[in-house]
Image: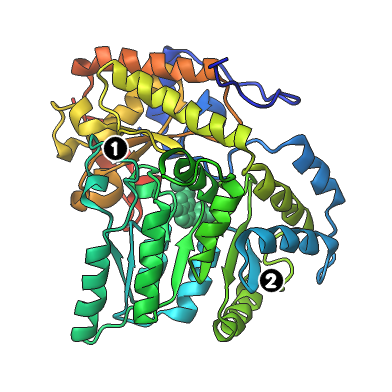
Amino acid sequence: MKTIIEPFRIKSVEPLTMTTEEDRKELLKKASYNLFLLPSKDVMIDLLTDSGTGAMSSEQWAAMMRGDESYAGSPSWFRFLAVMNDLLGYSHILPTHQGRASERILFSCMLKPNDLVPSNTHFDTTRANIEASGAEAVDLVIKEGTDPMCIHPFKGNMDLQRLRNCIVDGQKSGRRVPMIMVTVTNNSGGGQPVSMENILGIHKISREFGIPFFIDACRFAENAWFIKEREAGYQHKTPKEIAKEMFSLADGCTISAKKDGMVNIGGVLAMNDDVLAQEVQNSLILTEGFLTYGGLAGRDLDAMAVGFEEVLQEDYLRYRIASTGFVANHLHQKGIPVMMPPGGHAVYLDARKFLPHIPLEQYPGQALACAIYLKGGIRTCEIGTVMFGAAAKMDLVRLAIPRRTYTQSQMEYVIEAIEEVFQERQSIRGVRIEWQPKALRHFTAKFAPVS
Ligand code: F0G
């Protein structure tokens, strides 16, 4: 049989509130044409993010009942530690409440003003936390990674020559490069994978220059699956063996467990360096909590211990990557401008190509996200001029797919809605900003349609 099916059945369901286009016209107006301001009950299919929005398994819920809420040294902590030790292999493993807490703690201990921190592409919170330390975040993804239509098996790869130049030029001008990072998969670059060969290349450069290498490993399991499918020599390895090999090439990692940890809240910070670990532990206790719970409940640690194992099951990963590809490939076949090849956790529409009649000052990505909500009650996220201002290189609309949450017929509905929006695209108008805050405007800005 060729059909790939959901490798689970549904035990508990949440009803969707069904709305009509008429209802949504009013709801959108009330939310000032900003989808972040919609109550989620007014959304039928929520593709705003894949972070913390997935479904937990019956085994995870069972594990939560075993959760032990002791302040220090709880059995939940030891179960979490055993799983993470086996997977990551780093000497120091710390729980945090989510990815950006790991980032903030790590950067506040490692970075000084004027430092350079290269990566393939830093995610927004990573970049913001680096900048909060006074350092500069440098994106060095290969050139294929910035072209939405370019077909390449590992569009998330880092350009190793530019990495070397960044370090050498930095040294010449007296700027430190205290760490190298790589994001797997490359979220801001379309959820595109990074090859093992590239990770090995980064490892070698980090050794040559004596610079620590950290992985932003939010979607490590999806990255491992792409390596298994696309990189020579990995077809017969398990996703877990591949993930362990990735982690073995770095000196530590930050993880938001809200993605491939398959939980609603949680994070991890891990490293080998004993001296750094001392400093990081002090910061963790100061701001997150004691070393054996890090700002989480014991039950959250138990849910993570199960989630980090379940995510590496082959049946799950085969389904996961196929279901994202299902949406992207269907849209692509209909001539709809979608980033190709499909990434792991999300499908990205190219709004500049979708709505060429809308100038950038009228936010084509925001206009498209609103049109998709109006058509089908589907919430997506603009990643473009609203989010980054005039610096935006692309105007994308991200459809992030929560894990194990929506059925294939719901995704067929999403495809149909976008096809209809595409047919009616000439009638879509741009939007203008009526009010905006000083920073991070995409969350709270108020828009109105251009008349
Ligand atoms: N790194 C990457 C690559 C991410 O995608 C995220 C979050 C973080 C770090 C921060 O983790 O949210 O747990 O603090 N990405 C979410 C998204 C928010 O929608 O892509 P966090």
Q: Circles 1 and 2: CB distance less than 8 Å? A: no
Q: How many marks?
A: 2
Color encoding of the figure: rainbow
Instruction: Please indicate whether residue 215 sits to the left or right of residue 357 in the image.
Output: right
Q: Quadrant of residue 70?
A: bottom right
**Secondary structure at numbered mark 1:** strand
Q: Residue at x 26, y 36 (%)?
A: 151
Q: What kind of residue is marked 2?
A: Gly
Q: Residue at x 28, y 44 (%)?
A: 386
Instruction: Please indicate whether residue 427 sits to the left or right of residue 183 in the image.
Output: left
Residue 451: image x %, image y %? 18, 25
- The quadrant of the rendering that contains the N terminus is top right
Residue 107: image x %, image y %? 45, 74
Q: What kind of residue is marked 1?
A: Leu
**Up-down: is 389 above or below 270?**
above
Q: Residue at x 21, y 50 (%)?
A: 143
Residue for badge 2: 289
Kindly identify which numbered label has been placed on residue 445.
none
Q: Quadrant of residue 312?
A: top right
Q: Does residue 124 show up?
A: no
Kindly identify which numbered label has been placed on residue 396.
1
Residue 441: image x %, image y %? 34, 50
The residue closer to the viewer here, 76 or 389, is: 76
Q: Does residue 212 show up?
A: yes
The residue closer to the viewer here, 16 or 351, is: 351
Residue 90: image x %, image y %? 61, 70
Q: Earlier in the sequence, mark 1 or mark 2?
A: 2
